[in-house]
Image: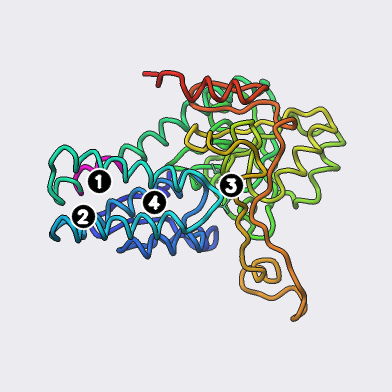
C-alpha cells in the first residue's frame, strides 16, 4: 500500500498526485504555506485527505513556533489555520479539521499548557484525525459492502480511494470491502475530465490491488447504463448538506440523473466529517471555480485554440432525491436525509 499523507520529522510528506501514475514521488512540505499550496495545486486531494493534510500542517506550524512566547505562538497558529483553511472552499473536511485543531489548542491553553505543550497536544490531535479517518473508511467499507450483490459491476467517478483519504478509501473502500467479503466485483472507472482523477488515480490504485477495472470516458457512462451493464454507482463526496444534497467532483450529478433514469442505485460513501449540518441544502455549498487552463490543456499540452473561453467549476451538486443511500462509518442513511443524517451525527461513536 502507499501512504497518502504522513507527518515526518521534517514536515508533512504527501504522495504527489499531480504526477501519478507516470511518476510515484513524494513531496516534503515544511511550512503551513507549503501545505496550503499542496492542497490548492491538488498535490494532495480528496476531501478526507485534505482534512488530514490540513491537521498535520497546523501541527507542523505549531511545533515550529513552539519556542516563541505565548502571544507570538498564538498569532502563528491563527495565521497557519487561516492560510490552510482558505486553500480550497468546497470540501468541508478542510474547515472541519482546522476547526478541530483550533478547538484542541483552546482546550490545551485553558488547561494551562505553554506553547510546547499546546504544540504536542496538536501533534496528537492530528494523528487522531488521521487514525479516525482510516477507521471510518474501513467501517464505511463494511456497511457499504452489504449493498453490493455477490457479483457486481460498479461505476465510480473521480477518485474516492486510498489516495483521497488517510487510506482504504470511501467509495473504493466499499469496493475493497465487498471483495474482502468474497464478492465478485468489477469496477468501471470514469476518467473524470478535466484533471482525470479517474484515469490517473482510481485506475492506478485499483490495478495495484488487482481489482478488475475498466476505464471509460465520462461520455460513455450513459449508454453503458442503458445497456444494463452497471449494477450500482458509488461515489464519494466533498460536502453533504443537512438535507442530503451532495457536492462531489463535477460530472457526478449527470451520473446520478442517468442512474435514476435507468433504475440503478446511486450510493454516496463518505465519513460524517463530510456532512455539514450548518449547510441546509446544496445551493449553499460553495463551489470552487478553478483555472480554465485545466480545461484548455491536458497534462500541460494545449488542446483548445488560444482565445477560447472555458468554464471550470470543480464540483457539482446532486440533489438528495437522486441519492439512494449515504453510507457513513456509523451506518447507512436513507431518505429523508434531514432526519437520518441528524440521527447518525448524534449517534454514539461505535467501539
Ligand atoms: O478536486 P478533487 O480531486 O479534490 O476532488 C475529489 C472528489 O471530488 C472526491 O470524489 C471527493 O473528495 C471524495 S474523496 C473520498
Sequence order check, earlier mark of 4 and 1? 4
Sequence order check, earlier mark of 3 and 4? 4
Q: Position of residue 348 (x, y in %)?
A: 41, 18
198 relative position to 217: left or right: left
Residue 123 — which label? 1
Task: Work out whether 300 lies above or below 233.
Answer: below
Q: Name the quarter where the N terminus is drawn.
A: top left
The residue shown at (61%, 63%) is 290
What type of secondary structure mainly makes up the magenta span? helix
Binning the other alpha carbons within 10 Å of mark 4 as few (below 14), some (14 to 19) or many (20 upward) gives: many
Q: Position of residue 236 (x, y in %)?
A: 59, 39
Sequence order check, earlier mark of 3 and 2? 2
Q: CA distance from mark 1 to mark 2?
A: 8 Å
The residue shown at (35%, 48%) is 55
Q: Which residue is mark 2?
A: 63
- The answer to if 125 sits in the magenta stretch is yes
Sequence order check, earlier mark of 4 and 2? 4
Q: Name the quarter where the C terminus is drawn.
A: top left
Q: CA distance from mark 3 to mark 2?
A: 32 Å
As helix, strand or loop, the secondary structure at mark 3 comes to loop
Sequence order check, earlier mark of 1 and 2? 2
The quadrant in which residue 196 appears is bottom right
Sequence order check, earlier mark of 1 and 3? 1
Residue 159 — which label? 3
Task: Work out whether 106 lies above or below 85.
Answer: above
Q: Which residue is mark 4?
A: 54
Amino acid at each position: 500500500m502507499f501512504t497518502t499523507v504522513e507527518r515526518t520529522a521534517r514536515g508533512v510528506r504527501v504522495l504527489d498526485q499531480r504526477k501519478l501514475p507516470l511518476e510515484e514521488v513524494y513531496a516534503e512540505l515544511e511550512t503551513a504555506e507549503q501545505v496550503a499550496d499542496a492542497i490548492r495545486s491538488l498535490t494532495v486531494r480528496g476531501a478526507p485527505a485534505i482534512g488530514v493534510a490540513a491537521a498535520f500542517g497546523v501541527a507542523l506550524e505549531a511545533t515550529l513556533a513552539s519556542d516563541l512566547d505565548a502571544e507570538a505562538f498564538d498569532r502563528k497558529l491563527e495565521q497557519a489555520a487561516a492560510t490552510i483553511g482558505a486553500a480550497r472552499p468546497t470540501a468541508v473536511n478542510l474547515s472541519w479539521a482546522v476547526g478541530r485543531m483550533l478547538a484542541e489548542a483552546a482546550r490545551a491553553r485553558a488547561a494551562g499548557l505553554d506553547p510546547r505543550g499546546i504544540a504536542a497536544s496538536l501533534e496528537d490531535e492530528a494523528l487522531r484525525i488521521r487514525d479516525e479517518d482510516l477507521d471510518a473508511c474501513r467501517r464505511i467499507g463494511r456497511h457499504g459492502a452489504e449493498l453490493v450483490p455477490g457479483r457486481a459491476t460498479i461505476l465510480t467517478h473521480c477518485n474516492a480511494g486510498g489516495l483521497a483519504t488517510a487510506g482504504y478509501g470511501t467509495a473504493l473502500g466499499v469496493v475493497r470491502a465487498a471483495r474482502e467479503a468474497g464478492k465478485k466485483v468489477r469496477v468501471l472507472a470514469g476518467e473524470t475530465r478535466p484533471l482525470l482523477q479517474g484515469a490517473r488515480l482510481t485506475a492506478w490504485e485499483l490495478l495495484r490491488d488487482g481489482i478488475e477495472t475498466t476505464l471509460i470516458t465520462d461520455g460513455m457512462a450513459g449508454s453503458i447504463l442503458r445497456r444494463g451493464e452497471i449494477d450500482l454507482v458509488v461515489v464519494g463526496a466533498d460536502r453533504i448538506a443537512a438535507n442530503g444534497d451532495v457536492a462531489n467532483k463535477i460530472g457526478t450529478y449527470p451520473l446520478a440523473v442517468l442512474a435514476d433514469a435507468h433504475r440503478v442505485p446511486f450510493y454516496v460513501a463518505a465519513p460524517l466529517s463530510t456532512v455539514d449540518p450548518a449547510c441546509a441544502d446544496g445551493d449553499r455549498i460553495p463551489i470552487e471555480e478553478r483555472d480554465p487552463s485545466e480545461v484548455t490543456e491536458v497534462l500541460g499540452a494545449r488542446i483548445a485554440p488560444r482565445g477560447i473561453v472555458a468554464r471550470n467549476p470543480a464540483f457539482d451538486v446532486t440533489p438528495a432525491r437522486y441519492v439512494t443511500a449515504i453510507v457513513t462509518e456509523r451506518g447507512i442513511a436513507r431518505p429523508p436525509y434531514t432526519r437520518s443524517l441528524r440521527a447518525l451525527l448524534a449517534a454514539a461513536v461505535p467501539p
